[in-house]
């Protein structure tokens, strides 16, 4: 059985973008693949985090995975920091990644522009991500388009390592949705909807209440033409609303366009808000039932046990190949 693996940083509250671009693909594929989903908490501290909030969000992430439909019987669910092998492999991979290729990462360039004190961790972030993936021989990595470049870096590093030391790593491939690979900010539809953006008006958080969800969608930025059709260049706001609708309904953009062709913007927004509300309220109901349950710890204990075994074996193989200690 082929393996998929993905993670969503607990660097903020998960958003509609995290659901559509990240979690939903795992849910869709969990029957056909050996599926791994984890909380990359070590990635989160590449940007300063409040320790109490971080701890809360790690648990929230896991509860949200489950509430979004990640089935703990079909998935291995775990926390990155509970497995000490990730950072160890990351070091070896850092020594096999060139400054030039790491410097090309657009997420680093963008995030470092927005911060004053840029850490080395923010720069090496994609290499830790490569370790997350390569430790488990993942075949596919379901992500939004913003993470494609990072998965490609993981591939390049794995190919290089295999050439130098012999076949150790499986070469992973990014798995990106045709529709919904990049959900845009509702107030600023040329930017990605991102949980760490400062202005929350354009972001739908998975735990927003109904009033807020509706308000945010009804005040989404559009254009003055008044016609509903998909044109990312000239109508980014309307195209984003069509994308959200099509992604949640699992239909093509063309079908969504056809459905809304005689709508005005107000009616379009109302129907998109109805669908988003329906999906999110259902997730929230499930979330509220799970968040304080012991089930979360049981699932995480199991995840930690399973992944530690796999990761230990892979890391020892790597250490042997590079000539470390007495491995
Ligand atoms: P940050 O702002 O802290 O960088 P983020 O919101 O951009 O976070 P995550 O939530 O960590 O990113 O991303 C988890 C997964 O969800 C990744 O696969 C990412 O590509 C995907 N994802 C996040 N936001 C979007 C979006 N707006 N559209 C599509 N996919 C997204
Ligand atoms: N960088 C990813 C989170 C992440 C990830 C991973 C995703 C860390 N390690 C391994 C897939 C596979 C992000 O979404 N910001």
Image (spheres, rainbow, N blue to C red):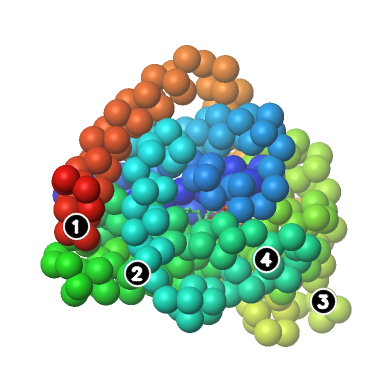
Residue that label 1 marks: 323
Give the residue at x 39% y 56%.
91
Residue that label 2 marks: 96
Callout 1: few (<14), some (14-19), or many (20+) C-alpha neighbours within 10 Å? few
Q: Residue furthest bottom?
A: 234
The alpha-carbon separation of the residues under discs 4 and 1 comes to: 36 Å
Between discs 4 and 2, the one toward the N terminus: 2
Q: Is residue 327 left or right of residue 74?
A: left
The alpha-carbon separation of the residues under discs 4 and 2 comes to: 24 Å
In this rendering, the answer to whether 326 lies above or below 78 is: below
| Res. 111 mark | 4
Residue 267 in view = no
In this rendering, the answer to whether 196 lies above or below 182 is: above
Between discs 1 and 2, the one toward the N terminus: 2
Give the residue at x 82% y 56%.
199
Callout 3: few (<14), some (14-19), or many (20+) C-alpha neighbours within 10 Å? few
Residue 271: x, y in percent? 70, 54
Residue 172: x, y in percent? 29, 64
Give the residue at x 27% y 43%.
311
Between discs 1 and 3, the one toward the N terminus: 3
Nearer to us: label 1 or label 3: 1
Q: Is mark 4 within 8 Å of ligand 1?
A: yes
């Amino acid at each position: 059985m082929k393996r998929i693996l993905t993670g969503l940083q607990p660097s903020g509250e998960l958003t509609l973008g995290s659901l559509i671009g990240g979690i939903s693909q795992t849910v869709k594929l969990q029957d056909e693949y050996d599926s791994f989903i984890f909380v990359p908490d070590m990635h989160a501290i590449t940007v300063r985090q409040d320790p109490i909030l971080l701890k809360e969000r790690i648990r929230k992430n896991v509860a949200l995975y489950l509430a979004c439909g990640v089935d703990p019987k079909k998935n291995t669910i775990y926390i990155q920091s509970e497995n000490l092998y990730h950072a160890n492999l990351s070091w070896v991979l850092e020594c096999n990644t060139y400054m030039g290729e790491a410097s090309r990462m657009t997420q680093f360039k963008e995030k470092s522009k927005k911060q004053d004190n840029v850490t080395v961790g923010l720069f090496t972030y994609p290499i830790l991500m490569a370790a997350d993936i390569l430790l488990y021989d993942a075949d596919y990595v379901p992500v939004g388009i913003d993470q494609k470049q990072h998965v490609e870096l993981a591939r390049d590093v794995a190919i290089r390592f295999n050439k130098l030391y012999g076949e150790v790593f499986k070469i992973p491939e990014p798995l990106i949705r045709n529709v919904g690979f990049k959900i845009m900010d509702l107030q600023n539809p040329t930017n990605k909807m991102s949980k760490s953006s400062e202005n929350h008006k354009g972001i739908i958080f998975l735990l927003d209440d109904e009033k807020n969800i509706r308000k945010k969608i009804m005040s989404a930025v559009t254009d003055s033409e008044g016609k509903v059709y998909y044109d990312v260049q000239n109508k980014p706001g309307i195209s984003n609303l069509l994308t959200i609708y099509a992604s949640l309904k699992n239909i093509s953009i063309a079908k969504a366009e056809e459905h809304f062709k005689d709508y005005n913007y107000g009616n379009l927004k109302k129907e998109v808000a109805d669908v988003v509300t329906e999906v999110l309220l259902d997730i929230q109901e499930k979330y509220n039932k799970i968040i304080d349950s012991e089930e979360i710890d049981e699932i995480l204990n199991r995840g930690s046990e399973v992944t530690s075994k796999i990761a230990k074996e892979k890391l020892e193989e790597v250490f042997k190949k590079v000539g470390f200690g007495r491995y």
